[in-house]
Image (spheres, rainbow, N blue to C red):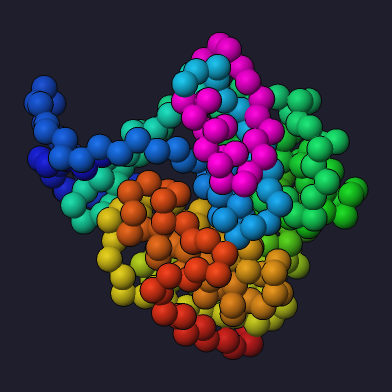
Amino acid sequence: MEAEGLELRKHADSPTGMEQCFSLGSKIEIKKIVFTTGGGGTNAAVTFGRQEFKTACVGVVGSDIAGKEIIEELEKERVEPLFQKHDDDFTAYSVILVNPNAERTILSYKGEGQHFDVNRVPFDKLKAKWFYIDSLGGRYDLLETLVNHAVENGIKIACNPGGKELAHGLEKLKPLLKHIDIFAVNKEEASGLLGVKLGEDEELFKKFRDVCSGIFILTDGHNGVQVCFEGEKYSAGVPDSPIVERTGAGDAFNSGFVCEYVRNRDIKKAIQFATANASSVVTEWGAKAGILKKGDWGPWPLVEVFEKSF
């Protein structure tokens, strides 16, 4: 939702250095409200569905209206919803407060997302060539089970972990990282995981290469992206395009990269399509409305991708 009266203030104690503030006890008028579904897993699944890959999405919802809407939407998007249903809580829910500068604050209620049962994952229905693993709420047992199943069945893995997965630390994650084919994080997450100071990008790439032989995607917001694979580094900026709000941009980029890479095995084209997908998403409200369909790169120019050895 977009509101007036939300003041931006710099604050040294804030994780991002900036806070979006409103007066306690005040009544703030909302200029625009949009109801839509989200979550990294369903956002990525819609990218795959619109790119006409045979796609299933595994998750958990409550037996409420929100859970029903999520399942119905995925079905409309050519995605098979393989969702567990749980009755003790509400489907996970977020309120997103959008500032006029397009940045946002997300109030997240995990709800039924906390009750996913690893023993109910329908592996017999997952005859996949690729797994795309998103945030798992910090469930190491679930991450380990998914990776082991993929390895045992010759399934390739793309992974965009959440902060709670990364919080397990590098030593605990190392046995799993060596099996990841595409690993995507932002610069702050990578620095924390690998124990490298922000700004020391070359050291990040070298240290990651020691623990994983797959493709390493390092996103950096409006500064663009760097991708490392087999001693080659690719970098691209962000096109100058209108921005309504940024929710879902990372999901759109990472899932878009995986789509084009799976289709053509061309890292440069994968970066270009991923950038187009993310650039389209931020022009719409919500994380799914702007996701591109197959063959439709919209009005987005192909970003220039630079390559060099390191």
Looking at the rendering, which quadrant does residue 62 occupy? top right
Q: In the picture shown, does residue 115 fall above or below 187?
A: above
Relative side of 18 to 233, left or right: left
Residue 290 is situated, as x and y percent measured from the top left of the image, at 41, 56
One can see residue 220 in this view? yes
Magenta-tinted stretch: 66-89
The image shows residue 136, relative to residue 83, as above or below, that is below
Check if residue 80 falls in the magenta segment.
yes
Q: Is residue 19 visible?
A: no
Choose between 117 and 308: the one closer to the eye: 117
Judge left or right: residue 24 versus residue 174.
left
Residue 246 location in percent, x, y?
Answer: 35, 54
Residue at image coords 86%, 51%: 151
- 253 or 173, which is in the foreground? 253
Q: Is residue 171 left or right of residue 236?
A: right
Viewer-proximal residue, 88 or 211? 88
Q: Residue 206, how many percent across, how many down? A: 65, 72
Indicate yes or no whether the magenta region holds residue 8: no
In which quadrant will I find the N terminus? top left
- Where is the C terminus found, in terms of image quarters? bottom right
Q: Residue at x 56, y 49 (%)?
A: 46
Q: Is residue 209 left or right of residue 103?
A: right
Residue 288 lies, with reference to residue 112, above or below; the image says below
Q: Residue at x 41, y 51 (%)?
A: 289
